[in-house]
Amino acid sequence: MTVFVIWCGYEATGPPARAGSPGLSAEGALTLAVFAAAIWLWIFSPIGDTYIALGAAVILVVTGMLPDEQLFDSLGEETVWLLLAAFVIAAGVTTTGLSTRAAAYIVTGAHGLRQLTHLLTSVLVATAFAIPSTSGRAALALPIFIALAKVLADRPRVVLSLSLLFPSVILLSAVASYLGAGAHLITSQILQAAGQEGFSFATWLLFGLPLAFVSSHLCAELILWLFTRREDRRKGLSISLHQVQKHSPIPLSGPMTVGQTRAALLVGTVVALWCTEPLHELHPAVVALMGALLVTSPRFGSVSMGKALKTVPWSMLLFMAATLTLGTALLGSGAADWLAHSIMRPLTDQGAGAGVAFVIVVVVMSTAAHLVVQSRSARSAVLIPLVISLAPGVGVEPMAAAFASTAAAGFCHTLTSSAKPVTIFSEVEGIDTFAPHHLLRLSLFLAPLMIVLILLFAFFVWPALGMPLFTSP
């Protein structure tokens, strides 16, 4: 770390920068040193990610590198309020048992392993619009997995494949929704801080849902191919609602309760209003707050406001606000421009092929980043300022490059510690799930598949949907 800081200072005061490469001011060098220290601690220290991020932001304020208003304003960002209200809505929906009942009803219609796998995959993709957290979705899906695992206890390879399917699809499908991960909101906010348009719920849905659907179902097929045999896939399957009910505390049959009906209407209405923002011009955070007030209302709500607020991951919200502050400081101080040009300088010398090479490098680096920085939000705070600083210089649209990087950073399947959903499903009491070598085997095949898939979307699919990859000549 000392060598890195000395190097930064040397670059700030040493030989003149090459043409086209921005110089590094003393303010930028200090900001970069603090940011590098935060990354170092995220990787090698047992200290909590939120503590490190807040500490780094406070240091920048105390040293005068960052106005204190900017730190406090980040806590009042509309994205923080949006996530807060979304978590309250999710608490109300979860309380009714609607999600568990819907999932159980769908999977009991499967007559074979492949059909069960893809039905579960579709259900898990849909949960990205109801629960704004991958760990929350994992906790919601765990009872369904436990019930299925007990029903299928005589088929251990099937249980193994399902234990891998649940966390894998939860992680890959998060890109479907703007609220699927805090990293998505951080990416949009950093883009806006850099003068770019950013993303809305509807635009993120347009670009993210197709990738989430395709990648999740490809992952499902990969898991079937790697961890089951032909006889497992050919053997018939018969799972009744009665069998699942024996292992679920939530009533799965009979007419829907009033609370479940209201929860379904509420979620449908909120998502519809988010998608039609240009028509009614209600800010997504305001829509979410209205939904939160309804779901916690004394007479019609399914949960009290106090109980719902206890389910909000306040540490995650503080972490998101702090990392957003750090990313903005990198851009404002010029450190992101300098660092991006220093790291990617060889690419800028590639001429006409620089843009293509840049996109490939960004996707590969973002996919591998989970091996170094475990938090998805932290990965976006590190990568996105660099990506959007360099993208225009190689003829790439910053929004497209940022979206590709964020989508690729959603891959975190290699280790049990790489993501909370993986950790949750790695140790389920009374059920034999996957071991680390199973996860590594899946990752060896899934990582290159995801890289190729995201590159195909970046070069062909997203431009056709209205997000060009390269700037106009």
Image (cartoon, rainbow, N blue to C red):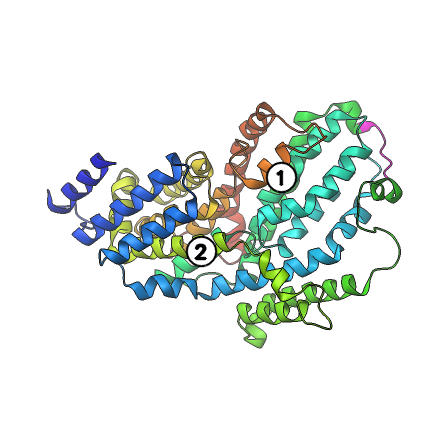
Mark 2 or 1: the one toward you: 2
Q: Residue visible at 63% across and 48% down?
A: 137
Is residue 464 one of those drawn in magenta? no
Q: Going by the image, does 41 lie left or right of 160?
A: left
- Mark 1 falls on what kind of element? helix
Q: Between residues 105 and 394, which one lies in front from this camera angle?
A: 105
- Which residues lie in the magenta part? 234-239
The answer to whether any part of residue 376 appears in the image is yes
Which residue is situated farthest in the front direction here?
306
Quarter of the picture holding the N terminus: top left
C-alpha distance separating marks 2 and 1: 25 Å
Relative to 320, say whether 443 is above or below.
above
Measured from the top left, where is residue 45 in percent x and y?
Answer: 38, 36
Relative to 421, say whether 271 is above or below.
below
Measured from the top left, where is residue 76 in percent x and y?
Answer: 43, 66
Relative to 42, say whether 320 is above or below.
below
Measured from the top left, where is residue 29 in percent x and y?
Answer: 21, 48
The residue type indicated by label 2 comes to Leu
- Mark 2 falls on what kind of element? helix
